[in-house]
Image (cartoon, rainbow, N blue to C red):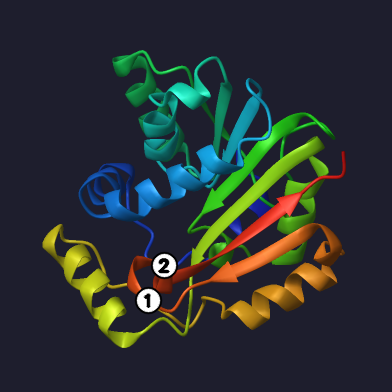
């Protein structure tokens, strides 16, 4: 049974696993490729443990597992909802993907200290009530020289890009994205300072093309 902490989320635009899976497959592909490229570029070791926090139905892990750079890695997806976990594990089983979905709270990761080589989160941080704690948790589980990678949408994204993204969502019957719960880069920078991660993290964002949709945080654990 989920704890009260797990349930007290109030996530916006909650969809069931089947709808989310269709949306992720049909709409998020271009952004997925950018994210996967960054995972590969930042990979800290040849073989290790990779964790996706807020993994949805496991689409990112599925695609990443097919890249040669992540052959032999242990891959774990953490997700709040049972239906997402079950859908992800069904996906992996059907395609013989080397990954596992588990239920877990981003504010209290079910992982030991210094047990992960790379921990990532895509389009999840804005949903989390206690973002500072979630950031600390990602840093806590990293092994020495491990990498944390966060991508999320910006509240101040260009209107034409938001309109384009919402049109893509509408094509698969998905609700429009909302901006009020999202962060601007300066707010993310403040959170990193408050979490004690300013000295080991970098924040980047673009103003053109797909990169203008959001921002990137890289956390580098001390070696």
- Position of 35 relative to 119 (above/below): below
Q: Position of residue 51 (x, y in %)?
A: 60, 35
| C-alpha gap between disc 1 and disc 2 | 6 Å
Mark 1 and mark 2 residues within 8 Å of each other at the beta carbon: yes
Foreground residue, 128 or 196? 196
Q: Position of residue 133 (x, y in %)?
A: 77, 59
Locate the N terminus by quadrant. top right
Q: What residue is rendered at 56% in x and 50% in y?
A: 121
User: For mark 1, does the 10 Å Cα neighbourhood hold few (<14), some (14 to 19), or many (20 or more) residues?
Assistant: few
Q: What residue is rendered at 76% in x and 49% in y?
A: 220
Foreground residue, 102 or 1? 102
Circle 2 residue: 211
Q: Tell me the element at label 1.
A: loop
Q: Is residue 123 left or right of residue 220?
A: left
Can residue 69 be seen here? The reply is yes
Q: Tell me the element at label 2.
A: helix
Q: Quadrant of residue 61?
A: top left
Q: Which circle marks residue 208 in the picture? A: 1
Give the tally of numbered discs.
2
């Amino acid at each position: 049974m989920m704890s009260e902490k797990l349930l007290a989320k109030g996530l916006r635009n909650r969809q069931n696993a089947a709808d989310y899976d269709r949306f992720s497959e049909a709409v998020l592909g271009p952004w997925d490729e950018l994210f996967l490229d960054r995972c590969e570029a930042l990979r800290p070791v040849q073989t290790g443990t990779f964790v996706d926090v807020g993994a949805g139905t496991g689409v990112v892990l599925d695609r990443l597992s097919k890249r040669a750079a992540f052959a032999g890695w242990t891959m774990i997806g953490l997700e709040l909802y049972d239906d997402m976990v079950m859908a992800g594990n069904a996906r992996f089983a059907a395609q013989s993907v080397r990954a596992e979905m588990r239920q877990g709270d981003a504010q209290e990761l079910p992982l030991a200290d210094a047990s992960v080589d790379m921990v990532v989160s895509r389009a999840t941080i804005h949903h989390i009530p206690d973002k500072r704690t979630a950031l600390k948790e990602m840093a806590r589980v990293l092994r020495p020289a491990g990498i944390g990678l966060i991508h999320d949408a910006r509240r101040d994204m260009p209107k034409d890009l938001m309109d384009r993204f919402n049109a893509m969502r509408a094509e698969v019957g998905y609700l429009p994205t909302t901006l009020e719960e999202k962060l601007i880069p300066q707010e993310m920078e403040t959170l990193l300072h408050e979490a004690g991660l300013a000295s080991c993290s970098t924040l980047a964002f673009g103003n053109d093309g797909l990169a203008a949709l959001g921002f990137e945080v890289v956390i580098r654990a001390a070696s």
